[in-house]
Image: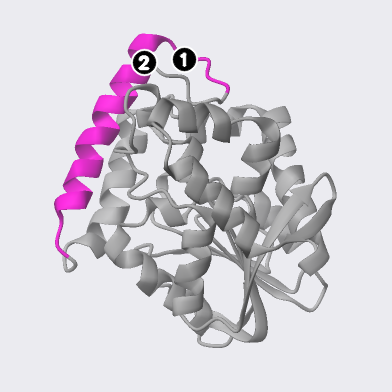
Amino acid sequence: MNNPGRKEFRSADRLRAHYLVERELADRLRAATAAERPRLYSAVYDELYRRVPDHPQLTRKADPDSQREAVALKLRLLSPFLRPNLDFMEIGPGDCSLALAVARRVRRAIALDVSAEITKNLDVPANFELRICDGAVLPVETSSIDLAFSYQLVEHLHPADALEHLNHVQRCLRPGGVYVCVTPSRLNGPHDISGYFDAEACGFHMKEYTTTELAGLMNDCGFGRVQLLLSVKAFLTRVPTAPVWILEQLLEALPHRQRRQLASLPLIRQLVGVTVVASK
């Protein structure tokens, strides 16, 4: 069994049980037509959380220290963009812990998710709203958002829906608005549950991207400026696209095992895992 490079406290039997359920549901989503997918996104995620009660997204809610650490990491990334009169949107908020933390620092915070299972019984402030959506089409008013954020979300979209999703993010942003997008690199993946068993993502990561591949999609959607940013502790550093592209191409040419090992080394992992920031 492969090790996807993350902390895991479940037994091998529970990992395989999770894998089999997620693989079954992901295959259903991959085979669905464009007309079927909008309702399926919510259905398969709700079913996953019901059938896999020890899913990390659920158990993390019971671990306050782990939750605080994850929120603090994302807040450091977003802090340069936050201000009190800002309207914030998070897509794929998980348990909404980040969106709720951001709500204390902005005018309004909207969280968009495909499943209501993980966000049951939330105690929310007046300037926070959770909206359920299909993942690609975002139920948010045009030109109403200053800062959009997604963390490990794009890879969960069916490849045929990814471009539509990015177009909708751009539509939601006000002129000058910013989309901060973090997604795991295909080069050291897979990063879903199939990372323990397969060479390619076949769970709910419908497609894992390279950084420059994702940046290219954003350019295709007409974002005015697309930057690659490297997050080092509390600082963001702009990284030129060309050297990242060259590094990714060199890694792509390697066999999977060797590519994954090299791309998981700390320095290389940081370079190929650069955050993409797109401005309208």
Q: Which mark is residue 54?
A: none
Horizontal side, residue 29 vs residue 83: left or right: left
Residue 26 part of the magenta segment: yes
Q: Nearer the viewer, residue 220 or 26?
A: 220
- The answer to whether any part of residue 199 appears in the image is yes
Q: Would you call the spot at circle 2 few (<14 residues within 10 Å), some (14-19), or many (20 or more)?
A: some
Residue 44 in picture, x, y percent from top left: 27, 46
The amino acid sitting under disc 1 is Arg
User: Dot 2 lies on which element?
Assistant: helix
Residue highlighted by disc 1: 10
- The residue nearer to you, when weighing 65 against 170, is 170
* Residue nearer the viewer, 50 or 242: 242
Q: Which residue is mark 2?
A: 14
Q: Are the residues at dot 2 and dot 1 in contact (C-beta closer than 8 Å)? A: yes
Residue at point 16%, 62% (across, down): 36
- For this view, does 43 lie left or right of residue 95? left
Q: Position of residue 46 (x, y in %)?
A: 33, 44
Q: Is 200 left or right of 208, judged from the image as shown?
A: left
Q: Residues within 10 Å of mark 1 (few under 14, many from 20)?
A: few
Quadrant of the rendered structure where residue 117 is? top left
Above or below, 170 against 270 in this view is: below
Tell me where residue 242 sits by quadrant: bottom right
* Distance (Cα) linking label 2 and label 1: 6 Å
**What's the amino acid at mark 2?**
Arg
